[in-house]
Each structure stands twice: as C-alpha cells, then as structure tokens.
Amino acid sequence: MTGRVPVLSAVGPPRLLAGLDRTPWLDLAAHLALHGPLPHLSGGELADLAEGVDLRGRGGAGFPFARKVRAVLDSRARTGPATAVVVNGSEGEPGCLKDTALLLHVPHLVLDGALLAAGALGAERVAVGVAREDVELSVRRAVAERGAAEPAVHVVRLPERFVTGEGSALIRGVGGGPALPSGRRVRSSESGLGGLPTLLSNTETFAQLAVAARLGVAGFRELGLPEEPGTVLLTVAGTHVVETPTGLPLPYALRVCGADVGQGLLAGGYHGAWLPAAAAAAATVSRGSLTAAGAVFGAGALLPLPEATCPVGETARVARWLAAESAGQCGPCFKGLPALAESLYAVARGGGEQATAAVQAALRAVERRGACGHPDGTARFVATSLAVFADDHAAHARGAGCGRPVLGALPLPEGVRGGEPRPFAARPPAPDERLVVDWTLCRGHGLCADLLPGILRLGPDGYPERAAIAVPARMRQRARRAVRRCPALALRVETAAGR
C-alpha cells in the first residue's frame, strides 16, 4: 500500500522486536545468537505448545492456533502425508504495520515459526505471501541466508489490495491464481495450497510460535495476563509499532507512541469498531477488555481520532476507499459498499433525513450477505461511527456541520488524501466472463436456471449441465444476481484474466 517504515518501540522486555536496538535487520547469525537454536516438535507437541500459551491468530480473527494445527493433522490422517504451511504477510490494512515491521527487521523469527510448523506437520510446501517490494526483498534475503533448507520456502509477491489478506484470497494468490476471495466455505486445513491440508496463519502468529517454542509454556506466560499470556504488537496511528505485554492500560500504550484517545478510537482497523473516548481510556490491551467495551482487537491496529478533525468526513473518506477495494465478486460488496460510501458523503454535505435513511438502508443491504468478510467489516466500521459520533452525523445531516475540517487523520494509501479522496474506480468491463459451478457446494436448488434461462440449463438430475458457462455481456448483471442468490454459494463469476 505504501512504503512507510514503522517506528518501533517496546514496553517491557521485547521478544518479537528484541535486538533491534543494536541493528535494524537481524541476519541469521545475530538472530541465532539472540534467540538460540530452534527445537524440533512433533505435530502433537506443536498443538500442545500452542494450546498451553493460548496462541491465537494475530491477523484479526483470533482463532486458536492449536485448533488449526489439529485440523491439519486430522486432514493429513485422511488424505495422506503431504501438507503445506502458508504465512500471511500481505497486510493490506493501511492502519497496520506490525507484520511489515517483523518481515522488514526480524524475518528469521517468522521463518523459524513457519519451518517449526512445517517440520511438525511434515509439510512439503512452505510459502510466504507479501505485498510490498521492500518486504519481499527482506524475506528473500533471509531465505537465501538459510541456504538449501528443507522444505524450501517460497516468497510470493501479491497485489497490494485490502482483500488480498483474506484467507482464501491469499491461498489462491500464492498458488498462482487471482488473489481474490473464493467465496467457498472450504477450510484451508482441509484443502488449501495446491489442494493440500494447509496451516495458514498471520506473520506475527508464526513469530510468537518461534518465541514460545524456545521459552516453553511457563516462560512464555511470565508476561501478560493469565488468560491472555505473552506480548502483542500494536500499530498506533498507522505509524508506530509497539510491543507490549497484554493487560497494559491502553492509554499508556498510546502515550508511548505520542498519541492519546482523542475524540474516539478505532480499534481493530477498518474492519474494527469505534470506541468513545471514555471507553477507550478505561480499556486495557487485551481481547477481553476491548470486546467488553464493544470493540474488537483484530490485528492490533489502534487509530485515535484527533480532536481537530471531522469524524463524519473521516468516516466517509475511508468508506469510499473500502468500497474501491471490493473484489467485485458479489453484489453486497460491488454495489452495496459504493452506495453506502456515497450516502455517507450525502450526510456530510447536509443531505437531511433522506441521506441518513439511505445510510441505514445501505447498511442493511450489505450486512451478512457478502461472499467474504469485507462487507460486514466495512458495515461495522460505519455503524459504530454513526453510534459514537451520533451528534456530529446529525449536525452534518441538518446542514450545520461540526465546524472542523477533514485532516485525513485516518491513514490511506498514497494518492488518497484529504477530505475529498479520489473516487472509487468504476469496474472495468470484464471480457470473456464465465459462470463457474463449484460442485462441492452445489445442492441442485435450480434457482440459477430460473435466473439465467437459455444460458444455464439443468440436466436430468436437476444439476447444471456444465461446470463453466460463458456469459454474454448482456447477461452479466443477471449472472451476478444468480451468484448472489445461490443458496449454497456454489456459483462465482470468473474472467479470462483471473483464470
């Protein structure tokens, strides 16, 4: 997204960022001198370690890592010994830089975690998906230092898009396909990279795993809360990355980075939730505390909104960018998010009750209806802004405004600046589109044939006759309607460029 390099700091004994006070990039020799050799673990030992330290995914969802490991082991027992490990280092969130910090400065710690997991699972493929050129060069340099390691680690550069980091999009991109969400409800632990059972997790998760393997359960638990042990990486204001034990007062973590809670705080990034200033000031750095306050921890992005900027304009500005980041594969995202963003702009410009009602209608139109989490995450970002900054939204709708300019305090990629960002790009024409049937999901409802008469025909068994059907330009809108309405999510539209 940008070439920004994070400012690094730590509260308490650093683990993930250790050694960076002496050198900005830890080569293999310095890394081993600091952390020591990596132990070897079996699959069961790996799962027990992750469970013992309550290691959870640090990419946003917070899913227990031990459950992922055991799911891959179960799939391997059914399908055969071959598995894969994939590190999600794409970080398409403009307000998050902590994975970038790890891969730019301590890539060997991340590779340790990935290779530890690969050894425990008997993985034949290990891949690291990244989006920034400088990150790619850093990881490739680290891989080269390790020589002919087994299994080999492949570094794959992916498009710098917000949705690239979605799990199925990353798996598809690393595998050579389009880095777009698949819309399929198939777990990577069952069928991921190359169809293999795949352990997919975030950059920080693998780095934490490497630390835990060396410290052991008891050593790892010496820092942090008993129920959320260890340290976390936070990105504050889109510029600073700080490592802190869990349980630290959130305002203190902000002050270390030269910030305060402002008029409100966005926790969890642009798929997160807004907190009022008072709630943010009372919170601690933990999933439990932020959840209790009505927010999400997500990937650890904390974005305080300065008092001097307009919350309505800031929200509309980011919503328009999120709409432009749509994968364009389902109506709630491709149609609904632009409508939501423009309704917000209408409110900001004094559109009255009609504009306010349009925002609420747009929210209802996208929630729980997308092929991936992008519409729901965007809706949460907007809905919590409406709640936390209710007076400001109401004042703008009446035409009075709040009297503050839009300073662009919420970070966006280069080229998207100020209160009036570049408009979202119109979707280019899609040549040679085709409708694809996923046989693993299709249940023979037959609704698609009713929506596409003459294009999609059902066989004697009530299922579509073909798995891929060319879609004429005049039928593209109806094809997308069929995708949206398929009860089993068994349809998708592909273009020639995305095959």
Image (cartoon, rainbow, N blue to C red):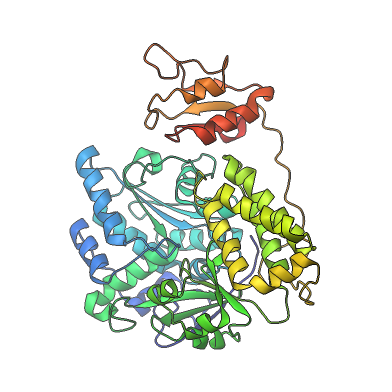
Q: Residue at x 57, y 26 (%)?
A: 434
Query: Relative to 481, does residue 362 appear above or below in the rendering?
Result: below
Given residues 302 and 112, the one toward you in this image is 302
Q: Quadrant of residue 7?
A: bottom right
Residue 326 spot, x, y in % from top left: 61, 48
Asked whether residue 415 is in view, the answer is no
Residue 219 spot, x, y in % from top left: 26, 80
Given residues 112 and 216, the one toward you in this image is 216
Given residues 373 and 382, the one toward you in this image is 382
Left or right of 61 on screen, residue 54: left
Query: Relative to 312, does residue 355 appear above or below in the rendering?
Result: above
Asked whether residue 363 is in view, the answer is yes
Residue 175 spot, x, y in % from top left: 46, 42
> Split into 4 quadrants, where in the image is the C terminus?
top right
Query: Relative to 91, does residue 267 appear above or below in the rendering?
Result: below
Q: Quadrant of residue 97?
A: bottom right
Extreme-top residue of the structure? 460
Q: Residue at x 37, y 64 (%)?
A: 206
Residue 44 spot, x, y in % from top left: 18, 58
Left or right of 422 on screen, residue 298: left
Q: Quadrant of residue 203?
A: bottom left
Query: Relative to 43, does residue 490 appear above or below in the rendering?
Result: above
